[in-house]
Image (tube, rainbow, N blue to C red):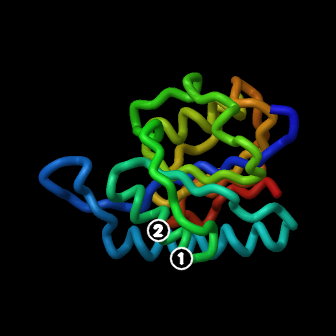
Amino acid sequence: MTAKVLLTLWRHGEAGSATNDAARELTDRGSVEVSAMASDFSAWLDAAGLPVVAKLYCSPLIRAQQTAALLAQQGCAERPEICAELVSEAIPESFADRVFDDDTHVVAVTHQPFVSHAIAFWSDDATLAPLAPAGYTTLQVTSLERGGATVLRHRPDPRSAGQMVFS
């Protein structure tokens, strides 16, 4: 990867119970929190003059698909694409720069522990708070290697008034 691109990692919203993990859907609270964070995210992109989202990927699990659909409704992207690699068991070292193609801003909606491990690995910063449901982090990425990204914005918890903002 030669040009720097943006990668926003988003944890799905709060999910309820179900007979199996794959069937867990967003709660009403989860939907509200995702929508609020998406609105905040869009406003920040505009104010900072950053590129709009070119691609929106999500895990195949229903709660991630619902979160991605809410992001799309808030104008964060056209429509989500399911990415089978975005599962909780994924490891950041297995992702390659090819996921970006020619896109300048990619959003990936996924799960713990992958999402927080990926942020810590790519930014080489294990001190960042893990993402709570509906939390997100935007990275400026040079490469998907340890330390190949810089954190631009870290919104780990929609319920926290003290959210960390780097720009």
State the residue at coordinates (75%, 69%): 44
Q: Is residue 53 left or right of residue 88?
A: right
Helix or strand or loop: what does disc 1 sit on? helix
Q: For label 2, count other residues whose C-alpha is less than 10 Å away and answer few (under 14), some (14-19) or many (20+).
A: many
Which quadrant holds the C terminus?
A: bottom right
Which residue matches tag 2? 69
Q: Amino acid at mark 1?
A: Gln
Residue nearest the observer in this picture, 7 or 99: 99
Helix or strand or loop: what does disc 2 sit on? helix
User: Farthest residue in the left direction?
Assistant: 19
Report how far apart the C-alphas of labels 1 and 2 lie in the structure: 6 Å
User: Farthest residue in the front direction?
Assistant: 102
Q: Amino acid at mark 2?
A: Ala
State the residue at coordinates (86%, 33%): 2
**Residue 115: x and y, percent?**
52, 41
Total marks shown come to 2
Q: Is residue 127 left or right of residue 90?
A: right
State the residue at coordinates (71%, 34%): 123
**Residue 98: x and y, percent?**
67, 33
**Residue 16: x and y, percent?**
25, 61
Against 29, residue 15 (above or below) is above
Which residue matches tag 1? 73
**Contact between labelled residues 2 and 1, with CB atoms less than 8 Å apart:** yes
Against 83, residue 16 (above or below) is below
Against 114, residue 43 (above or below) is below
Which quadrant holds the N terminus?
A: top right
